[in-house]
Amino acid sequence: MFLDYLNLIKRSILNRKLRSFLTILGIVIGAIVIVSIISVGQGMNDAINQLVSSVGSDRIFVSPGGISLGPAGSSLTNTKFSNKDVEVISKAEGVEYAVPLITKSAKVNFEGQNKYANIFGTPVDSKSLDIFKNIEFYKVSQGRTITSQDKFKANIGSNLANNFFKKKINIGDTLEINGKKVEVVGIIKNSGSPIHNNLIRMPLDSAREILNEPELISMVLVKVKLGYDPAKVAENIKKDLRKYRNVERGKEDFTVQITKNLIEGFKSVLLAAQIVLIGVAIISILVGGIGITNTMFTSVSERTKEIGIMKAVGATNLQIITIFLLEAGILGTIGGSIGVIIGSIIAELVEIFAATKGITLLKTSVSLELILATLILSFLSGIIAGLIPAIKASKLNPVEAIRHE
């Protein structure tokens, strides 16, 4: 019996190929958006977790004014930090030590070609190097890391070394930064972050001299003492800085961020974007459902005589409803299947494109659960859309239906 139903449905769909395609188009678009957005979103979530976890949960970022997501938390603000601010931060309860960082764009010349790149200055004493050693985007894949013995020597990002200039930069090559010659002693491991793959890292004193910024502090990186809660230490830092800078609570001219807050900030923005786009996808599927409803009403009208014959030879109302509901559900499932395939391809293309831009952390994932959920949603959309036409078909009078022309 079920195979008979499927044969009837197959014949109906194939006899109306163009109409069937146009009917499922809305479902296809909705499924594409759902699969591509959720898979890319999951990949971005995983990338954020991996990137921030590589920094460590025992790190706190303190910056003057607002904080950005750049390599050193630089921000467009007139507020500045001084060495005294770093001292106040380092003495806060729960702080093991605090490291000042600077970042600023500068003109870089290599083999006669001029470009601008971010210069990233970090202290190179043993304590400072310890705070960086486990951070993925500070590790060196070629050459060696900069040390306290280096002056005007640098580690450079992998993309800057290989793709930034026309000619590849090798260990031992010399860059000219703001007129100063700087030797490349190491290539930083590809971190998947375009920001860190394109920077030039050098000792803090050398960076300050080259940038002509003897007092600049873009950000302070704090390591929390073992056994202390980073959130409580962050509050201690805020309290001490408010007292030193003579500012009231809520009117701080500095920003203190823990790793957890950075993750939540990233994810809240990502989630908001996903919700909006998935809302668009659901609307598209609803529009597709309306298309299925219209098609099924037309199908009932065109097949009135056929329905009358089926009822005359013994088909029950439930069997008529089942046939039309199955047809609507199959139309929805076909649309969902096409959408899953195209959405998966789009997600894969996004990952490939990200890799070409040096964002290797972004790995999209089309899970079996996502595929099944999309197909079930598409099937149910078809079933719901076909319910009223199916009921209408079941209520046709067989005598009148047979006479219908």
Image (cartoon, rainbow, N blue to C red):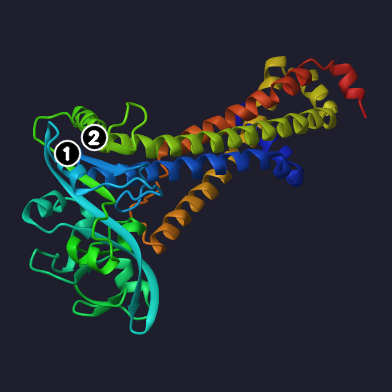
Q: Is residue 331 above or below residue 83?
A: above
Q: Is residue 355 above or below residue 80?
A: below
Where, by quadrant of the figure, is residue 41 drawn? top left
Q: Residue at x 70, y 26 (%)?
A: 324
* Pointer 1 with pointer 2, Cβ within 8 A: yes
- 51 or 258, nearer to the observer: 258
Q: Residue at x 25, y 32 (%)?
A: 238
Where, by quadrant of the figure, is residue 182 drawn? bottom left
Report x, y in % for residue 195: 35, 57
Q: Quadrant of the N terminus?
A: top right
Q: Residues within 10 Å of mark 1 (few under 14, many from 20)?
A: some
The residue tagged 1 is: 88
Q: Is residue 331 above or below residue 316?
A: below
The residue tagged 2 is: 241
- 234 or 397, nearer to the observer: 234
Q: Residue at x 18, y 39 (%)?
A: 89
Q: Which amino acid, mark 2? A: Leu
Residue 220 visible here: yes
Which one is earlier in the sequence, the residue at label 1 or at label 2?
A: 1
Q: Which amino acid, mark 1? A: Val
Residue 58's disc number: none
> Would residue 327 appear left or right of 182 to someone viewing this image?
right
Report x, y in % for residue 270: 44, 39
Real-space Cα separation, disc 1 to disc 2, in angstroms = 7 Å
> Would residue 142 appear left or right of 62 to someone viewing this image?
left
